[in-house]
Image (spheres, rainbow, N blue to C red):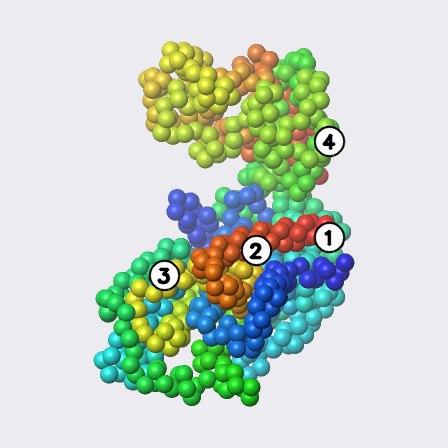
């Protein structure tokens, strides 16, 4: 029994892994070339921007907050880069400017949330409308990118080529790099642990000497950075900027985080879970693409069901934990 | 403790919250190597004083000298850096983090700027060793019992180089054995030269462990006493604002009523885990029973239990001889029990309705939405009570917020009286109203009793309890400790019982 007891907190994580495995097995048994390394690698490449956005969302949700501005910031970043390139800026400058924008944008929302004690839901809702409108202000429709760095370099020389001819796309590398960075922040720095502490019990964290304000502002700054980074990766992936893209992407990101086992109330969760959550969403998409006849809206239906199942599961685990505490 | 140099010296501390003066010029000092108890009823200012010393609140005036230096901590962190650490009443740690993390949060050992998890665990184990606690620090905090969590909180507090340890009601969730363990630990720490401030409302524990006692009342300091030279009776008296001479001179002037009513409610062993220890009680028709005790002793809790707000989870209860259980206020009302709660502004009156509407409210609630009371019926009812209780108002259509406190209280009584209860529980019915209005309420209570209604009267003014009641149940530390009845009732008798 002792073994089982220790594992309670990992149950949602293991459930996500099980769902992933199940979907993968379904894919393997239904389609002959589903198991190829290329399919697996593309899972990372195609979902890189969602994954990076979900990483940012994980920090916010771990702290007990929410960020609704993700999709809008991605769209804004993409059109910003596209129009900067159009005006003759070099890619490095354009990307740096857009990352800087994300950082400032997130920091401002964090400041509003902390100094005026406003609910994150409302502040980031305002941020969502603001960034979306700002994107249309820069350029009202889709804008293609003709810069050789985007058209050739990213596709030709940046991917990591494996010996068997499979290429790891640059977007996938970005995703993995972002994940490693996030893992270090979450588990190896005082800031990361403070995020968990605030989400677990803000009052206690305050009395334990955690600087709540600074940490909260930092969390939304970090989320803004990851949103902008997701925007950069999205632009690399689409090779164009579009102010009307990624509407509602923040909800996909939140779904991935929840399916990954992070509690919406904060304090409990893992980035590894978020990775699995993103891969599960990607896998569903891939399965439907492979099938060919199914309407892609089925993706949404399956995600809806999964989110519901995972919320119920978390509820159950929380209750089990409480029961165990009572009995000891 | 002699005339050693004080470790902490707070002088003239003033703190005002909007509308309330929480502390008015309090002096408080602690020397190294002593356990100093901070006593007072709820709202006396203990927690506010502690929170100023630990940087949670900012003081409005006064000075704090700690270890020879004037300090003014602006956050818990700053106070900790000075060497002042605190363990709060509720375990203020993060349940879903590991024990090791909880001990080291905010001060994790680092290597090259990154957290060294090995170092974190080692430091946690060492901190726990000081308390002779050997547990698996990698488990979540929530894995352990509240008592262990409390010790972990102390370990965290001692992990920094603290010179002053403040314990705010650390024992309220511990059982006797755990308290003994804690005290053993505190004595050891005292021996190591630590200054310890100990806040509790358990009188026994104060005498077990403290060297000195400081008593606060209504935001002011009553005095600091050597524990060995402060008799219990005197301490209780000072906590409720009476000095020993006053207690002796205060004698009740009240004729003894003949109580011959038949039994209405009888209970045995009813209690509620974590709220009230099991108790027996009996209530007869036509008598006024008082609940006496210090704030936090379980007075309101008893009424709430009998009214089914926080129903009992043990024992048995009978009403009019028939076994029953009161598991909800609805059931209580059905059994003829009514209650007015402590704070009439919050839980009682609806200030923007008229007197008539306020009086009809409970009646309507009981009858259901489909039984309509005609306006004529409503006015008849309202006028009847306005007259019977002497509510001073031009007419029944006045908004209740325009009435004085005493008259609001009467309107509130009328609301419940309209239901003709057989047992009426009044929690602090006289709080915040003037002397004249008090006398009128007391007269109304007497009249109700004459008619055979049973009353349960709660007041923090002990002389009110001793003046009005036929029988007094005395509570201490959430336990019924005895009963006094008839001619034996006096302020002194009640206080003596609490102090013993």
Which tag, 1 or 2, sits closer to the chain's start?
A: 2
Residue hosting label 4: B315
Which mark, by number, is residue A310? 2
At x 76%, y 51%, the residue is B177
Asked whether the residues under marks 1 and 2 belong to the same chain, the reply is yes
Q: Is residue B398 left or right of residue A325?
A: left
Q: Chain of mark 2?
A: A
Q: What's the distance in space between the residues labelled 3 and 2, CA to CA?
A: 24 Å
Q: Which residue is mark 3?
A: A247
Decide which of B185, B244 is in the foreground and name it.
B185
Of marks 3 and 4, the one in the foreground: 3
Alpha-carbon span between mark 3 and mark 4: 60 Å
Marks 4 and 1, how far apart at CA: 24 Å
Q: Residues within 10 Å of mark 3 (few under 14, many from 20)?
A: some
Q: Residue at x 73, y 31 (%)?
A: B315
Residue tagged 1: A328
SS state under label 3 = loop
Q: CA distance from mark 1 to mark 2?
A: 27 Å
**Sequence-earlier tag: 3 or 1:** 3
Real-space Cα distance between discs 2 and 4? 41 Å
Residue B58 visible in this rendered orientation of the protein: no
Alpha-carbon neighbours of circle 1 within 10 Å: few (<14), some, or many (≥20)?
A: few
Can you say whether B101 is above or below B487 in the image? below
Residue closest to the eye, B108 or B201: B108
Parent chain of label 3: A
Placement of the N terminus of chain A among the 4 image quadrants: bottom right
Q: Nearer the viewer, mark 1 or mark 2?
A: 2
């Amino acid at each position: 029994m002792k073994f089982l007891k220790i594992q309670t907190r990992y149950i949602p994580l293991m459930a996500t892994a099980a769902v992933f495995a199940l979907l993968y097995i379904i894919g393997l048994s239904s389609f002959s070339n589903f198991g190829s390394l290329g399919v697996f690698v593309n899972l990372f490449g195609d979902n890189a921007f969602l994954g990076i956005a979900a990483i940012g969302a994980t920090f916010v949700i771990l702290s007990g907050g929410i960020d609704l501005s993700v999709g809008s910031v991605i769209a804004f970043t993409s059109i910003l880069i596209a129009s900067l390139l159009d005006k003759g800026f070099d890619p490095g400058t354009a990307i740096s400017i857009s990352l800087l924008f994300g950082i400032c944008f997130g920091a401002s929302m964090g400041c509003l949330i902390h100094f005026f004690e406003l609910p994150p839901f409302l502040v980031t809702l305002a941020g969502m409308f603001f960034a979306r409108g700002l994107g249309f202000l820069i350029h009202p429709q889709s804008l293609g990118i003709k810069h050789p760095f985007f058209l050739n370099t990213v596709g030709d020389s940046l991917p990591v080529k494996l010996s068997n001819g499979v290429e790891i796309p640059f977007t996938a590398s970005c995703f993995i790099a972002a994940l490693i960075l996030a893992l270090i922040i979450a588990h190896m720095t005082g800031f990361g642990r403070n995020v968990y502490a605030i989400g677990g019990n803000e009052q206690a964290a305050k009395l334990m000497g955690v600087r709540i304000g600074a940490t909260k502002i930092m969390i939304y700054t970090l989320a803004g950075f990851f949103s902008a980074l997701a925007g950069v990766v999205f632009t690399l992936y689409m090779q164009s900027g579009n102010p009307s893209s990624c509407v509602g992407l923040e909800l996909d990101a939140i779904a991935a985080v929840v399916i990954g086992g992070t509690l919406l109330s904060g304090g409990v969760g893992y980035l590894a879970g978020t990775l699995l959550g993103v891969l599960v969403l990607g896998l569903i998409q891939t399965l439907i693409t492979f099938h060919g006849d199914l309407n892609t809206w089925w993706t949404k239906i399956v995600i809806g069901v999964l989110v519901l199942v995972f919320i119920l599961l978390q509820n159950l685990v929380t209750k089990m934990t409480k029961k165990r505490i009572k009995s000891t | 403790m002699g005339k050693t140099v004080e470790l902490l010296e707070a002088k003239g501390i003033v703190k005002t919250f909007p509308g309330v003066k929480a502390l008015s010029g309090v002096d408080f000092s602690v020397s190294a190597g002593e356990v100093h108890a901070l006593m007072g009823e709820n709202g006396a200012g203990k927690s506010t004083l502690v929170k100023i010393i630990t940087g949670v609140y900012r003081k409005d005036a006064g000075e704090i000298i700690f270890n020879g230096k004037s300090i003014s901590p602006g956050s818990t962190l700053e106070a900790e850096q000075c060497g002042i650490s605190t363990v709060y009443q509720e375990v203020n740690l993060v349940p879903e983090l590991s024990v090791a993390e909880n001990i080291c949060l905010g001060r994790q050992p680092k290597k090259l700027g990154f957290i060294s998890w090995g170092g974190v665990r080692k430091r946690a184990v060492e901190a726990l060793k000081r308390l002779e606690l050997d547990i698996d620090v990698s488990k979540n905090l929530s894995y352990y019992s509240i008592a262990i969590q409390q010790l972990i909180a102390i370990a965290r507090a001692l992990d920094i180089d603290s010179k002053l340890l403040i314990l705010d009601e650390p024992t309220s969730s511990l059982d006797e054995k755990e308290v003994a363990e804690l005290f053993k630990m505190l004595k050891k720490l005292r021996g190591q030269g630590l200054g310890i401030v100990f806040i509790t409302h358990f009188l026994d524990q104060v005498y077990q462990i403290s060297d000195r006692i400081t008593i606060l009342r209504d935001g002011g300091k009553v005095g600091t006493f050597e524990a060995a030279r402060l008799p219990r009776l005197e301490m209780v008296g000072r906590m409720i604002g009476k000095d020993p001479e006053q207690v002796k001179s205060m004698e009740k002037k009240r004729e003894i009523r003949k109580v011959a009513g038949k039994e209405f409610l009888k209970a045995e062993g009813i209690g509620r885990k974590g709220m009230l220890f099991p108790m027996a009680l009996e209530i007869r028709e036509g008598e006024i029973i008082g609940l006496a005790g210090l704030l936090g002793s379980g007075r309101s809790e008893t009424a709430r239990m009998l009214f089914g707000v926080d129903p009992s989870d043990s024992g048995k209860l009978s009403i009019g001889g028939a076994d029953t259980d009161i598991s909800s206020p609805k059931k209580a009302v059905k059994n003829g029990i009514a209650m007015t709660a402590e704070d009439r502004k919050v839980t009682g009156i609806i200030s923007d309705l008229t007197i008539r509407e306020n009086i009809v409210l409970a009646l309507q609630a009981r009858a259901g939405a489909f039984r309509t009371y005609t306006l004529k019926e409503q006015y008849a009812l309202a006028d009847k009570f306005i007259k019977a209780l002497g509510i001073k108002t031009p007419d029944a259509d006045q908004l209740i917020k325009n009435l004085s406190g005493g008259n609001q209280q009467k309107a509130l009584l009328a609301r419940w009286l309209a239901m003709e209860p057989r047992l009426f529980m009044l929690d602090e019915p006289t709080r915040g109203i003037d002397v004249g209005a008090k006398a009128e309420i007391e007269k109304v209570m007497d009249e109700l009793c004459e008619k055979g209604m049973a009353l349960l009267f709660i007041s923090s003014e002990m002389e009110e309890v001793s003046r009005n009641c036929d029988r007094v149940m005395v509570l201490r530390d959430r336990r019924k400790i005895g009963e006094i009845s008839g001619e034996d009732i006096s302020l002194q008798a009640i206080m003596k019982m609490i102090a013993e």
